[in-house]
Structures are given as C-alpha cells and as structure tokens.
Amino acid sequence: MQEDLGGALGHQLDMSGLGAAVYFVEITTERGSIVKRIVKK
C-alpha cells in the first residue's frame, strides 16, 4: 500500500481491514525516511 499525503502534517491509516499481525510502515519525507513497527491484535 502506498499513499501520497501531499505535504500533510497528520494522517490516520485505516487498518480495520487488516488481520492481527505485525506491520511495518515506512514514512518518507524530504528530510528522510523512518520505519515504524505496528502491532495489531
């Protein structure tokens, strides 16, 4: 899944359709990238 936020300062990711698991989300900006681990129970 990839989504362009167009410079938005905040965003919510709808994970309601995903099953229980560990997910990794990569966030990339002009200042760099970071990967966040999300645990959905």
Image (cartoon, grey):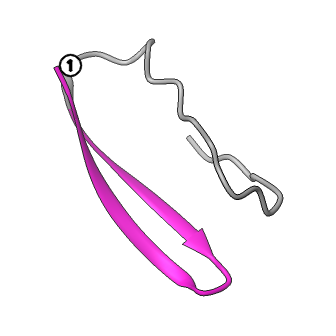
Callout 1: helix, strand or loop?
loop
Q: Residue at x 56, y 40 (%)?
A: 1
The spot of residue 14 in percent (x, y) is 53, 24
Q: Residue furthest front?
A: 9
Q: Residue at x 45, y 12 (%)?
A: 17
| Residue 29 versus residue 38 in the image, above or below | below
Left-right relation of 31 to 16: right
The quadrant of the picture occupied by the C terminus is top left
The spot of residue 9 in percent (x, y) is 70, 58
Q: Nearer the viewer, residue 35 or 11?
A: 11
Question: Which picture quadrant has residue 23?
Answer: top left
Q: Amino acid at mark 1?
A: Ala
Instruction: Count residues near mark 1 (Cα–Cα under 10 Å), then give few for <14, some for 14-19, many for 20+.
Output: few
Left-right relation of 36 to 17: left
* Highlighted magenta segment, given as a residue range: 22-41
User: Which residue in the structure is indicated by mark 1?
Assistant: 20
Q: How many marks?
A: 1
35 is within the stretch colored magenta:
yes
Q: Residue at x 44, y 14 (%)?
A: 16
Q: Residue furthest bottom?
A: 31
The spot of residue 39 in percent (x, y) is 20, 35
40 is within the stretch colored magenta:
yes
Question: Which picture quadrant has residue 19?
Answer: top left
| Residue 14 versus residue 29 in the image, above or below | above
Q: Main secondary structure of the magenta part?
A: strand
Q: Residue at x 32, y 58 (%)?
A: 36
| Residue 1 versus residue 25 in the image, above or below | above
Left-right relation of 26 to 9: left
